[in-house]
Image: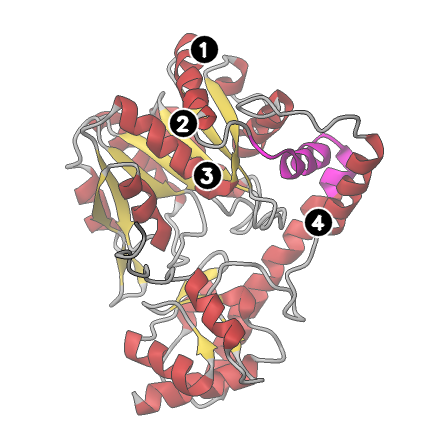
């Protein structure tokens, strides 16, 4: 029965990594996949994570199943992380949180839940957005449309166009927003702009679905939640997907969360019971290890402080690389101004490279960049910086 099945196209991002790994060029550079790398080009295990794992191994007494929605202690700590301790949504019980397989799992669980109760809704995503967003919501059965976000001419947010589009989205539709470190552009909303978007959401009555994959990678754990808090103040109902792949370095442990906000505790409980049904028929209950790591770190003051220092160091390295990259491009004799890269946030940047230049870099220089010109800034190291800038200079000259 499988004879007629044709090969599916490779994933736009993970497929690029597979091509990179098979490339024999010793100078090859991978700026595609979204993983943090240190100055040596390694994706490290955080010392706080190792310490938490030792503690877990020493104290573990069972390998029994987790609850469908995960450990309630994990859910409470996630809520405090994304909202801050003492937030009204927590104290009133109108937020409920499920432990999901990464942020991607949170997005899909949320999508399946919403499709059941908002079957006719359209999901609106930013133009551009993370390559997998569209696929996730389409797989759940939603129609997906775009709202304006990034202006390639100014290399900045086109907020006027974004605002005008959001003001036309009807009640009952779903709007996906990146809380910080927008993927793929690195261009975020300013605080005042977030406040305006929140007011529009409250007035229009569409449902915010917030992707919070990079908390702590923008400005700080606290500052990065501004957009979420602004939305929570205006919208009694919303969905938040969190990922701990980046800020805890738990990529292979697939650790994330889905948080549901309702008008009151009763509605939250009723809605969450349906999220548990979605989970039950999908993966039944979450894998424990990554959640135990997060719970152990966030509930231990010493480990939490150690983790925050490590998170700050990762964020500072990325910011430093951005400035170094811009300076190195200029020093390489490139006339084009790439200064906007230094002002973007998080791991990703819309570099301004064309698809033809991206293809040239891959085929001629073994430099791997996602189509559209998105680069993972964290993949730039002291070892590959000069080679990378020389390759970009050639691409800008030849193509």
Q: Residue at x 31, y 48 (%)?
A: 135
Along the line of sight, which residue is nearer the eye, 21 or 313?
A: 21
Question: Do the residues under discs 2 and 1 have CB atoms within 8 angstroms?
Answer: no
The residue under label 1 is 265
Q: CA distance from mark 3 to mark 2?
A: 22 Å
SS class of the residue under badge 1?
helix
Q: Tell me how far mark 2 sits from mark 1, CA to CA.
A: 15 Å
What residue is at 62 percent from the left and 50 percent from the top? 249
Between the C-alphas of marks 1 and 3, the distance is 24 Å
Mark 4 residue element: helix
Q: Nearer the viewer, residue 306 or 68?
A: 68
Q: Gap between marks 2 and 4, in whole Å?
A: 28 Å
Which image quadrant for residue 368? bottom left
Position of 115 with respect to 270 (left or right) is left
Q: Does the residue at mark 1 contact the one at mark 3 (Cβ under 8 Å)?
A: no
Q: Is residue 298 magenta?
A: yes
Q: Residue at x 34, y 36 (%)?
A: 195
Pointer 3: what residue? Answer: 105
Q: Position of residue 167 (x, y in %)?
A: 18, 37
Query: In the rendered structure, which segment of residues is drawn in magenta?
Result: 286-305
Mark 1 or 3, nearer chain start: 3
Residue 79 can be seen, yes or no: yes
Residue on which disc 2 sits: 232
Q: Does residue 128 appear left or right of residue 313 in this picture?
A: left
> Which of 274/194 is in front?
274
Residue placed under numbered mark 4 in the picture:
309
The spot of residue 223 in percent (x, y) is 52, 42
**Label 4 crowding class (10 Å Cα cut-off): few <14, some 14-19, many 20+?**
few
Alpha carbon of mark 4 to alpha carbon of mark 1: how far?
35 Å
- Give the x, y percent position of residue 31: 48, 69
């Amino acid at each position: 029965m499988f004879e007629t099945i044709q090969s599916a196209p490779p994933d736009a991002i993970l497929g690029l990594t597979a091509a990179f790994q098979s490339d024999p060029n010793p100078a090859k550079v991978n700026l595609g996949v979204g993983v943090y790398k240190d100055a040596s080009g390694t994706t490290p295990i955080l010392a706080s994570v190792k310490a938490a794992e030792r503690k877990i191994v020493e104290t573990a007494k069972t390998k029994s199943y987790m609850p469908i929605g995960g450990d309630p202690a994990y859910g409470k700590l996630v809520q405090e992380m994304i909202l801050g301790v003492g937030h009204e949504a927590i104290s009133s019980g109108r937020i409920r949180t499920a432990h999901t397989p990464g942020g991607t799992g949170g997005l899909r669980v949320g999508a399946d839940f919403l499709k059941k109760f908002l079957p006719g809704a359209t999901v609106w995503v930013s133009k551009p957005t993370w390559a997998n967003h569209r696929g996730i919501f389409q797989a759940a059965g939603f129609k997906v449309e775009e709202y304006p976000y990034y202006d390639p001419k100014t290399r900045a947010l086109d907020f006027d166009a974004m605002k005008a589009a959001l003001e036309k989205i009807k009640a009952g539709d779903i709007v996906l927003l990146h809380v910080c470190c927008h993927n793929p552009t690195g261009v975020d909303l300013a605080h005042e702009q977030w406040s305006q978007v929140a007011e529009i959401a409250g007035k229009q009555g569409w449902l915010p679905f917030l992707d919070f994959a990079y908390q702590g990678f923008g400005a700080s754990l606290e500052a990065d939640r501004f957009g979420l808090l602004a939305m929570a103040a205006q919208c009694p109902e919303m969905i938040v997907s969190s990922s701990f792949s980046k800020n805890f370095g738990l990529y292979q442990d697939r650790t994330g969360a889905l948080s549901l906000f309702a008008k009151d505790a009763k509605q939250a409980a009723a809605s969450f019971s349906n999220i548990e049904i979605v989970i039950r028929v999908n993966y039944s209950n979450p894998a424990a290890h990554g959640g135990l790591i997060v719970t152990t770190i966030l509930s231990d003051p010493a480990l939490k402080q150690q983790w925050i220092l490590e998170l700050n160091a990762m964020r500072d390295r990325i910011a430093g690389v951005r400035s170094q990259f811009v300076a190195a491009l200029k020093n390489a004799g490139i006339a084009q101004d790439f200064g906007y890269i230094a002002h973007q946030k998080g791991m990703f940047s819309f570099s301004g490279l064309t698809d033809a230049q991206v293809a040239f870099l891959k085929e001629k220089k073994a430099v791997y960049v996602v189509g559209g010109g998105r680069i993972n800034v964290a993949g730039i190291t002291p070892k590959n910086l000069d080679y990378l800038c020389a390759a970009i200079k050639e691409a800008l000259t030849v193509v």
